[in-house]
Image (tube, helix red, strand yellow):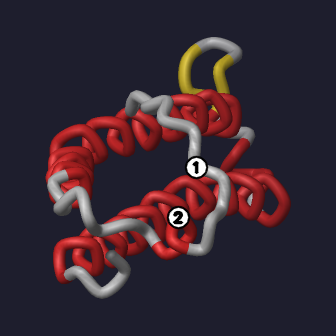
Amino acid sequence: MHSHPEFQSLRNGYRRFAALSTAVAVGGFLLYVLLSSFAPGIMNQPLVGHLTLGLALGLGQFAVMGVTAWRHVRRMRTHFDPVAEGLRAHLEQRRPGQHRPAEQAGARPQNTREYRTW
């Protein structure tokens, strides 16, 4: 299965997406920490009433994490899950005479319980 082109495409696409999502989330947090440490004058600027730019950016971190998680789930459901389901169906359609190497070696059969995707 590891050499299947769809699997390779799925794995590489997931890695790229995960790296980008992580960079956005961690980068936003790192930017906030660096601004808090090295630009307190900017972070203490009042916006409305007692709300400062630093507090607004700190609260914005929750929004960044929420949007990142939402985009991750949406991307998985629309781009990766259909390909994974196709690969799973491809594996299950193998001829009955074909066995996995672990089954040929007399290993205990795997649990037949299916796991649902999120």
Image quadrant assignment for residue 73 = top left
Q: Would you say the residues marked 1 and 2 are in contact, meaning their CB atoms lie under 8 Å apart? A: yes
| Residue at the outermost right position | 37
Residue 66 percent across, percent down from the top left? 48, 31
Residue positioned 49% across, 75% down in the render = 101
Q: Which mark sits nearer the N-terminus, 1 or 2?
A: 2
Count of picture labels: 2
Q: Residue at x 78, y 53 (%)?
A: 36
Return the x and y of residue 85 as percentages of the image width and height: 21, 46
Look at the numbered disc 2 and give the secondary structure of its residue: helix
From the viewer's side, name the closer residue of 99 and 13: 99
- Image coordinates of residue 29 in percent, x first then y, are 66, 53
Amino acid at pointer 1 = Pro
Between residues 24 and 69, which one lies in front from this camera angle? Answer: 69
Of 22 and 56, the residue lying toward us: 22
* Rendered residue at 24%/51% (across/down): 92
Looking at the image, is 80 positioned above or below residue 7?
above
Q: Quarter holding the C terminus?
A: top left
For disc 2, the neighbor class at 10 Å (few under 14, some 14 to 19, many from 20) is few
Quarter holding residue 51: top right
Would residue 86 be found to the left or right of residue 52 on screen?
A: left
Q: Is residue 40 left or right of residue 46?
A: right
Q: Position of residue 38 (x, y in %)?
A: 80, 65
Instruction: Name the disc covering residue 103, or none.
Output: 2
**Amino acid type at mark 2:** Glu
What is the number of the mark on residue 109? 1
What's the CA distance linking mark 1 and mark 2?
7 Å
Q: Residues within 10 Å of mark 1 (few under 14, many from 20)?
A: few
Q: Which quadrant, please, contains the N terminus?
A: bottom left
